[in-house]
Image: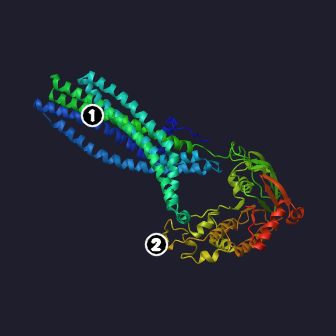
């Protein structure tokens, strides 16, 4: 489970960030750490060398060594920031790549669908994506900078203590409220980012509707662009108001801290100017120590606060990257034999959440090996949910699904899915080339096999006639290398053509044990639908298949027709048997066929 509570700065997050940076670029991490520590010593050394130089000048002593030392410190001060900037960039690039790799490896490990339908997970995932780009680097960077500032602060504080122990104690005490205040600010900002995450996601949703071709047609036809723009801006105003409130609080707190620091510095300068017991070099060192220690203290507090905020963001990354599979893996996986007997659902119950109604209520069904089974029913009867269970995108709440007597929960999920060739009703249209849109179901398919699948789906001539044939990009969202940034070469297929591409995708998987066809012809014209179902009847002959269709004329040739009603199997049998029974299937078949003859609109099953 993924914790949906507010983020927390935990040692686990710190360890994960440092380990990630170390695994991604150990050499650059060590280099950056050494440069950071060297940068901490430079200002302290420069202050002491300045004191020695001034005292030597006042005493008319030899100034060669202090001058050489100052020159070396100046060179180090000039070179270190450049070297730090380069090492930081190298470390950032390596850590970002490694963090993104680990995050999406974990996301690919979500083998089911439940987490992608959980709004809290989607909010966590969006923040984890941001954290992958910044948080590991920020934890390491801020931690090293905090160490640098701490060393600088200690160096200046020791110098100050040699001149005025009281002033050193006052300066140290003033750091405590600053640290506590900055940590509180970082917690407040992280909580605010967590609270506004749903609003930011809605803003992205409305922005996507306003800027994508898929929604442009309806939005312009219905004239709702201004309505959606208003919704988007309302979400932006709400998030801006939350951020503004935090920024105002930050301004007040940090302004108060600045006044406190200024008061301490002015008091110290007044004491130094009126003390009369200090040499010129001592006064210069005192001024440099007060200014340097306050600067280092402010940097230390700021870096600790940034580290704390980065750890809060890192909590989202750790929550997603450490979540593990959403479907339980079998402790002792069983091999999945080639289908010889059949697939059986035994008293299967399912609902999407404990507070939602049952979608399937005790479904028992057998799909015999080599038999074509059709599944029909009204909207919401549970047909698509049953398909998701067969593909193990979800597990039944109660009951079992057996593959030749083996519970599919005892089989590695990827092994099960390799045996299935699906066409989903809500198929994907990928912004890829025509060939890639087909081979995405089998990345190792040879070009000749791809073309054969396209021919069987009746889309080969369309794809072969595109500007670059099968290498044509089926999108105008991106450019392909062959397009040379000429948008006119991007091609958009019609809905029916896309459905044939999706069908070719399923046919490419060849001799799989189970073929699932969920409304494979819903976007086709009558002639194309007839062609596709004629081809599918031939293809399904002797194969184990499950067909879902609301057009009952397309299912009549199936070996077995199963009727789902309110999550239960209400009828099953051959077409003639169900027609003779005169129940729900027969009544709706007669209504639908009468509608085709008379042109009367009739309800269908979908």
> Is residue 431 visible in the rendered structure shown here?
no
Residue 268 x %, y % = 23, 26
Q: Residue 388 versus residue 527: which sits nearer the camera? A: 527
Q: Secondary structure at mark 1?
A: helix
The quadrant where residue 160 appears: top left
Residue 255 x %, y % = 32, 35
Task: Locate the C terminus by quadrant.
Answer: bottom right
Residue behind mark 1? 292
Q: Is residue 20 left or right of residue 143?
A: right
> Is residue 482 visible in the rendered structure shown here?
yes
Residue behind mark 2? 486
Which residue is drawn at the image coordinates 47% and 50% (left, top)? 234
Q: Residue 319 versus residue 30: which sits nearer the camera? A: 319
Q: Secondary structure at mark 2?
A: loop
Which residue is drawn at the image coordinates 47% and 40% (left, top)? 192
Q: Is residue 461 left or right of residue 84?
A: right
């Amino acid at each position: 489970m993924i914790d949906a509570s507010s983020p927390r700065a935990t040692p686990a997050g710190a360890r994960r960030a440092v380990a990630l940076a170390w695994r991604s670029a150990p050499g650059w991490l060590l280099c950056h750490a050494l440069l950071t520590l060297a940068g901490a010593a430079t200002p302290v050394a420069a202050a002491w060398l300045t004191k020695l130089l001034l005292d030597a000048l006042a005493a008319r002593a030899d100034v060669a060594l202090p001058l050489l030392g100052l020159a070396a410190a100046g060179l180090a001060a000039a070179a270190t920031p450049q070297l730090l900037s380069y090492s930081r960039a190298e470390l950032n690039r390596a850590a970002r790549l490694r963090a993104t790799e680990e995050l999406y490896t974990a996301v690919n490990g979500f083998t089911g669908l439940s987490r992608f339908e959980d709004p809290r997970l989607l909010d966590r995932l969006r923040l984890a994506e941001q954290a992958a780009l910044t948080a590991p680097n920020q934890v390491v960077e801020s931690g090293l900078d905090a160490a640098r500032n701490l060393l600088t602060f200690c160096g200046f504080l020791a110098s100050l203590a040699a001149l005025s122990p009281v002033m050193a104690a006052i300066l140290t005490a003033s750091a405590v409220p600053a640290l506590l205040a900055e940590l509180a600010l970082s917690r407040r900002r992280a909580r605010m980012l967590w609270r506004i995450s749903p609003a930011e996601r809605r803003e992205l949703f409305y922005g996507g509707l306003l800027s994508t071709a898929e929604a442009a047609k309806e939005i312009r036809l219905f004239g709702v662009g201004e309505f959606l723009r208003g919704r988007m801006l309302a979400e932006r105003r709400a998030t801006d108001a939350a951020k503004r409130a935090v920024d105002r609080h930050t301004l007040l707190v940090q302004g108060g801290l600045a006044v406190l620091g200024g008061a301490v510095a002015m008091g110290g300068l007044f004491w130094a100017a009126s003390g009369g017991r200090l040499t010129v070099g001592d006064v210069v060192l005192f001024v440099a120590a007060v200014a340097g220690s306050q600067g280092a203290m402010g940097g230390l507090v700021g870096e600790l606060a940034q580290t704390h905020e980065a750890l809060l963001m890192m909590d989202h990354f750790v929550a997603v990257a450490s979540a593990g599979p959403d479907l339980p893996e079998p402790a002792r996986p069983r091999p999945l034999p080639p289908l010889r007997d059949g697939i059986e659902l035994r008293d299967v119950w399912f609902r999407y959440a404990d507070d939602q109604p049952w979608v399937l209520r005790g479904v028992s069904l057998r799909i015999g090996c080599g038999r074509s089974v059709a599944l029909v029913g009204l909207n919401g009867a549970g047909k698509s949910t049953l398909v998701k269970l067969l593909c193990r995108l979800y597990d039944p709440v109660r009951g079992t699904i057996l593959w030749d007597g083996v519970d599919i929960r005892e089989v590695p999920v990827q092994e099960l899915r390799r045996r299935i060739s699906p066409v989903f009703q809500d198929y994907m249209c990928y912004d890829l080339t025509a060939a890639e849109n087909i081979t995405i179901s089998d990345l190792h398919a040879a070009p000749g096999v791809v073309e054969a699948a396209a021919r069987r789906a009746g889309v080969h001539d369309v794809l072969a006639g595109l500007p670059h044939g099968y290498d044509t990009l089926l999108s105008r969202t991106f450019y392909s290398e062959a397009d040379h940034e000429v948008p006119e070469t991007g091609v958009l297929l019609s809905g029916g053509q896309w459905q044939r591409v999706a069908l070719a995708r399923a046919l490419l998987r060849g001799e799989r044990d189970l073929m699932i066809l969920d409304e494979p012809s819903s976007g086709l014209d009558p002639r194309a639908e007839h062609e596709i179902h004629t081809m599918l009847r031939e293809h399904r002959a002797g194969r184990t298949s499950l067909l879902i269709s609301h057009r009952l004329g397309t299912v009549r040739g199936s070996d077995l027709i199963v009727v789902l009603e309110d999550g239960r199997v209400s009828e099953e049998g051959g077409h003639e048997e169900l027609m003779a029974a005169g129940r729900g299937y027969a009544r709706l078949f007669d209504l639908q066929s009468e509608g085709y003859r008379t042109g009367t609109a009739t309800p269908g099953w979908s």
